[in-house]
Image (cartoon, coloured by chain):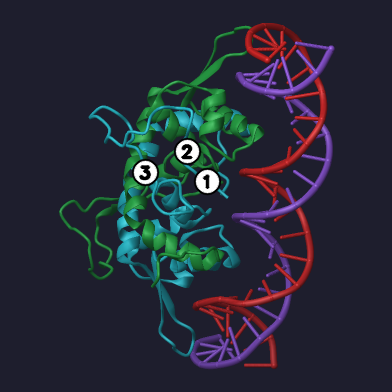
Chain colours: A cyan, B green, C purple, D red
DNA sequence: ACAAGTATGCACCTTTTGGTAAGTGCCCAA
DNA sequence: TTGGGCACTTACCAAAAGGTGCATACTTGT
């Protein structure tokens, strides 16, 4: 759903094909066109973290380490079992999360970040910081857009 | 659409490479409860960049500076007018992009990043880097998941 | 005259995503 | 025995998000 960046690379009519790393004050460096299916690294990254609850899940796991399903379920409030499981499965399939099943009698399973998951969590830090710093602006904009003018602590 | 979360962890010196899921060290700080509507900074950020083509748009604008609608359209191939316009409008509403209309006779308009947009673009760099570095893994996973031929990655 | 380009708008649809409610098998406490 | 918790699974739905295609008003090129 969310953030994808489709395929293909830049193009043609423009004469710029430099790969030069961005200058110090420049913003973003040119992504390497890499593997088929992705336009760039950002594309790959976003495909993997896109999911309503994925970042939150990563967040909890990064914070609390191995966490049992039930705990996660309670931590990420408002998420349904179906979706939680679904997102966990995708994260697992993507190698970001590890599921451990202690084949015990009353089921016991826990989830934790893999090294890859940890590295991604770190890459997310700047975004988190950005959001925190600019939340006021973002919030204002969303207020108008969605109409919840004042407060609305719902969920 | 919505992606929530916040992960603010800083483990400067601690590198990752293998390492077991570190028992929840205290290097991740709780989200600042923030404003109504957001769980945390990452949540705010992701809401703003979530859109199939938004990151790519930001990417082009960060790279090429002010870009006319038509150029953008050609650069971001496979996007439809409706969606491109839509995403641009949202980015504009969110204060990340500035639209300039040179009220000329054959319409002429261009888009560029605002300072806020630039700052976000910078926060996206680590994600881009992460994706580039781990694209092989991600690609492999997606190959199986989606079934498209991943010829060369033979494992 | 006519096609093409410019930057959109709009109606209509399909796909994707998330949500609800119920059920499963097993065990334990009341 | 009933009820609850555990970790899911499934069928069915609703809401988003994205896509297609046509339309606009005006101009320039052929």
Quarter of the image containing the C terminus of chain B? bottom left
Q: Name the residue under label 3.
A: A128
A29 left or right of A9 in image: left
Separation of disc 2 and disc 3 at Cα? 20 Å
B41 left or right of B102 in image: left
Q: Mark 2 points at which residue?
A: B56
D12 or A93, which lies in front? A93
Tell me, yes or no, if residue A129 can be seen here.
no
C11 left or right of A130 in image: right
A34 or A116, which lies in front? A34
Could you tell me residue A55's position as x and y percent?
Answer: 44, 54
Q: Which mark is residue B131?
A: none
Q: Mark 3 lies on which chain?
A: A
Quadrant in the picture for residue C19: bottom right
Q: Which residue is drawn at 52% across and 58% down?
A: A77
Q: Do labels 2 and 3 share a chain?
A: no
Could you tell me residue A62's position as x and y percent?
Answer: 33, 60
Q: Mark 1 points at which residue?
A: A6
Q: Which residue is drawn at 53% across and 53% down?
A: A52
Q: What element carries label 2?
A: helix
Foreground mark, 2 or 3? Answer: 2
Number of numbered discs visible in the structure rendering: 3
Are the residues tagged 1 and 2 within 8 Å (C-beta)?
A: yes
Are the residues tagged 2 and 3 within 8 Å (C-beta)?
A: no
Q: Residue at x 27, y 35 (%)?
A: A20
Separation of disc 1 and disc 2 at Cα? 8 Å
């Amino acid at each position: 759903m969310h953030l994808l960046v489709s395929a293909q690379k830049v193009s043609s009519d423009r004469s710029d094909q430099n790969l030069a790393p961005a200058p110090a004050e420049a913003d973003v460096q040119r992504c390497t066109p890499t593997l088929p299916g992705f336009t760039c690294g950002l594309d790959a990254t976003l495909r993997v973290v896109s999911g309503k609850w994925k970042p939150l899940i990563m967040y909890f796991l990064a914070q609390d380490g191995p966490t049992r399903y039930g705990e996660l379920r309670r931590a990420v409030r408002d998420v349904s079992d179906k979706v939680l499981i679904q997102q966990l499965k995708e994260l697992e399939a993507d190698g970001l999360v590890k599921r451990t099943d202690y084949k015990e009698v009353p089921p016991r399973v826990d989830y934790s970040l893999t090294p890859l998951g940890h590295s991604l969590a770190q890459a997310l830090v700047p975004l988190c910081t950005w959001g925190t710093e600019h939340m006021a602006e973002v919030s204002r904009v969303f207020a108008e857009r969605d109409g919840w003018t004042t407060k609305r602590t719902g969920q």
